[in-house]
Image: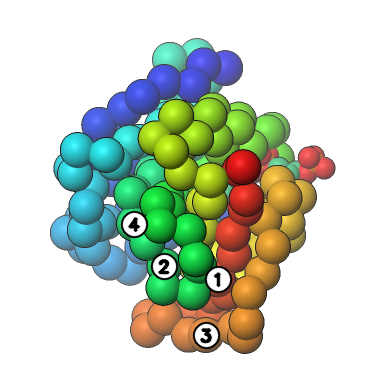
Amino acid sequence: MEVLRIKSIDTYAIRHKMLRPSGTVEDCMFQGDNDELTFHLGAFVDKKLVSVASFYFERHPLFQEQYQYRLRGMATLVDFQGQGLSSALLRTAFPVIKQNQCTILWCNAREKAMGFYTKLGFIPHGELFTIQNIGKHILMSINLG
Ligand SMILES: CC(C)(COP(=O)(O)OP(=O)(O)OC[C@H]1O[C@@H](n2cnc3c(N)ncnc32)[C@H](O)[C@@H]1OP(=O)(O)O)[C@@H](O)C(=O)NCCC(=O)NCCS
């Protein structure tokens, strides 16, 4: 397995399949995908891209930290889940985020994925909320300081 930086366009197929199966490809293009401080990571198994995650320099008003990163588009193809690939992407991202002077990474986690984020050290904040057409989410964050 290899973790590499990828382009936003490389994330769309896995985002589409795993996160927006009934949406269009346009639904898989996220705001800020091509911003200067955004980065995208991919896990490759036998040269095949099987897991993706994207990181945006974006502030959540609930957190005090001036500089924050947001995680979006975290997904692993079904056949490759449970092999530590998403964890590997996050562990690769943590030092990059710290290098950018940010000590907090947050995400709107799907309810079903909460257990995954908790294992990685994320903590939940507040109540579940619904994102239309996608389902219940909860704000989670990890302190990287
Ligand atoms: C959630 C998801 C990204 C995890 O990816 P993955 O590559 O399978 O994750 P990992 O193999 O790195 O899992 C790390 C640990 O979390 C656990 N885990 C993974 N998904 C979990 C879940 N939904 N609930 C509880 N624990 C979970 C794994 O068993 C593993 O535990 P271990 O360290 O004790 O073995 C993947 O299941 C997925 O793509 N789901 C569909 C899309 C999605 O919901 N993405 C999240 C959007 S917020």
In the foreground, 1 or 96: 96
- Amino acid found under the numbered disc labelled 1: Leu
Q: Label 3 belongs to which residue?
A: 129
Residue 98: image x %, image y %?
Answer: 50, 35
Q: Label 1 belongs to which residue?
A: 139
Residue 17: image x %, image y %?
Answer: 39, 52
Residue 48 visible in the shown view = no
Label 4 Cα crowd, 10 Å radius (few <14 / some 14-19 / many 20+): some
> Can you say which quadrant of the picture contains the N terminus?
top right
- Amino acid found under the numbered disc labelled 4: Glu
Give the quarter of the image for residue 127: bottom right
Q: Is residue 15 above or below residue 145?
A: below
Residue depth check, mark 1 versus mark 3: number of the one nearer the observer: 1
- Amino acid found under the numbered disc labelled 3: Phe
Q: CA distance from mark 1 to mark 3?
A: 9 Å
Residue 140: image x %, image y %?
Answer: 59, 65
Q: Are marks 2 and 1 in contact (CB under 8 Å)?
A: yes
Q: CA distance from mark 3 to mark 2?
A: 15 Å
Q: Is residue 79 above or below residue 124?
A: above
Helix, strand or loop at mark 1: strand
Q: Are marks 2 and 4 in contact (CB under 8 Å)?
A: yes
Disc 2 residue: CB within 8 Å of ligand 1: no
1 or 4: tag closer to the N-terminus: 4
Helix, strand or loop at mark 2: loop
Disc 4 residue: CB within 8 Å of ligand 1: no
Q: Label 4 belongs to which residue?
A: 58
Q: Label 2 belongs to which residue?
A: 60
Helix, strand or loop at mark 3: strand
Residue 65 visible in the shown view = yes
